Image: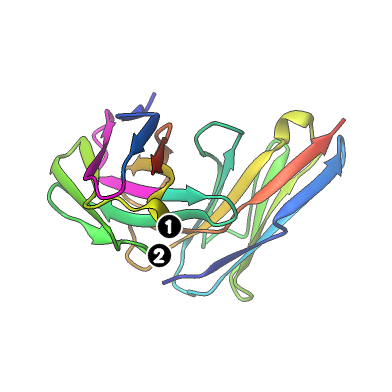
């Protein structure tokens, strides 16, 4: 069974803080993704990575950065958290070629 | 990027009836079309997918049809059951070949 885990289920941070969200997958998948999920807006892609140290912007990269130093780990960084980044963050991984994405349980981030 | 429109946003059916959810996409180069189901409080999970060289695919009570000319695809659920109640997301592959564009989701409620 593919397992995708995220470092926290719930997180509360203050405006201006630097926030790290971590995602780990145990199936040696090349592709990893970060989405945010907001009611009525579906799943919006923030960044994705198709190999170690490689990253591509998604649709809403502003205010975020990512890091992929090891194949199994993909980190999302909020450089200076703002209230409009309060959301559910979902990580996913998949093998190539484009195929099923396996999602983590999500991190509900609240920025106050 | 690719635009995926999904309709309806909410759908209520009686147990035993059929449910149909429709999606349209804009990029004619898209070649992979998955459907994900997300139960309340859980992570999205793939339920069925189709590639552009196939017009229809079935798996027990669910089926997906693809019309490449019209650039739309649909999810059909027959003999609906209360456990089919969830949010369903369609998606289409992006031209990068690595990532997906998701629709905004359809909240399906199956009433006994």
Q: Secondary structure at mark 2?
A: loop
In the picture shown, does residue A58 fall above or below B37?
A: below
The residue at the point 61 percent across, 33 percent down is B40
Q: Secondary structure at mark 1?
A: strand
Q: Which mark is residue B100?
A: 1
In the picture shown, does residue B97 fall above or below B69?
A: above
- Marks 2 & 1, CB-CB < 8 Å contact: yes
Residue A7 is situated, as x and y percent measured from the top left of the image, at: 29, 29
Query: Which residue in the structure is indicated by mark 2?
Result: B94
Q: Quadrant of residue B13?
A: top right
Residue A63 is situated, as x and y percent measured from the top left of the image, at: 28, 59
- How many residues crowd around disc 1 within 10 Å: few (fewer than 14), some, or many (20 or more)? many
The residue at the point 40 percent across, 65 percent down is B94
The chain holding disc 1 is B
Residue A1 is situated, as x and y percent measured from the top left of the image, at: 39, 23
Residue B18 shows in the view: no
Residue B24 is situated, as x and y percent measured from the top left of the image, at: 61, 68
Query: Residue B34 vs residue A69: left or right?
Result: right
Quarter in which the N terminus of chain B is drawn: bottom left
In the picture shown, does residue A88 fall above or below B72?
A: above
Magenta segment includes B10: no
The chain holding disc 2 is B
What is the distance, in whole Å, between disc 2 and disc 1 at their CAs?
A: 5 Å
Quarter in which the C terminus of chain B is drawn: top right
The residue at the point 77 percent across, 40 percent down is B109
Nearer to the camera, B62 or B100: B100
Nearer to the camera, B100 or A36: A36
Work out whether disc 2 and disc 1 sit on a shared chain. yes
| Residue range corresponding to the magenta coloring | A15-35
Nearer to the camera, B63 or A34: A34
């Amino acid at each position: 069974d593919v397992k995708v885990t995220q470092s926290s289920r719930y997180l509360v941070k203050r405006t201006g803080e630097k926030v790290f969200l971590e995602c780990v997958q145990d199936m040696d998948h090349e592709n990893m993704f970060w989405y945010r999920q907001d009611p009525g807006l579906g799943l919006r892609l923030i960044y994705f990575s198709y190999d170690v140290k490689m990253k591509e912007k998604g649709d809403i990269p502003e205010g975020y950065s990512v890091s992929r130093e090891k194949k199994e780990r993909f980190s999302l960084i909020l450089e200076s958290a703002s209230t409009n980044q309060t959301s559910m963050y979902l990580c996913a991984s998949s093998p190539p070629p484009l195929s099923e994405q396996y999602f983590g349980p999500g991190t509900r981030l609240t920025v106050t | 990027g690719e635009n995926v429109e999904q309709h309806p946003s909410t759908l209520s059916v009686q147990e035993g009836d059929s449910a149909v959810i429709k999606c349209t996409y804009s990029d004619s180069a898209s070649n992979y079309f998955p459907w994900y189901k997300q139960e309340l409080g859980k992570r999205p999970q793939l339920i069925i997918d189709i590639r552009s060289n196939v017009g229809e695919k079935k798996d027990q009570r669910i089926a997906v049809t693809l019309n490449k000319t019209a650039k739309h695809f649909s999810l059909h659920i027959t003999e609906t059951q209360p456990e089919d109640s969830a949010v369903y997301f369609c998606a289409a592959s992006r031209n990068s070949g690595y990532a997906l564009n998701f629709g905004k989701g359809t909240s399906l409620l199956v009433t006994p």
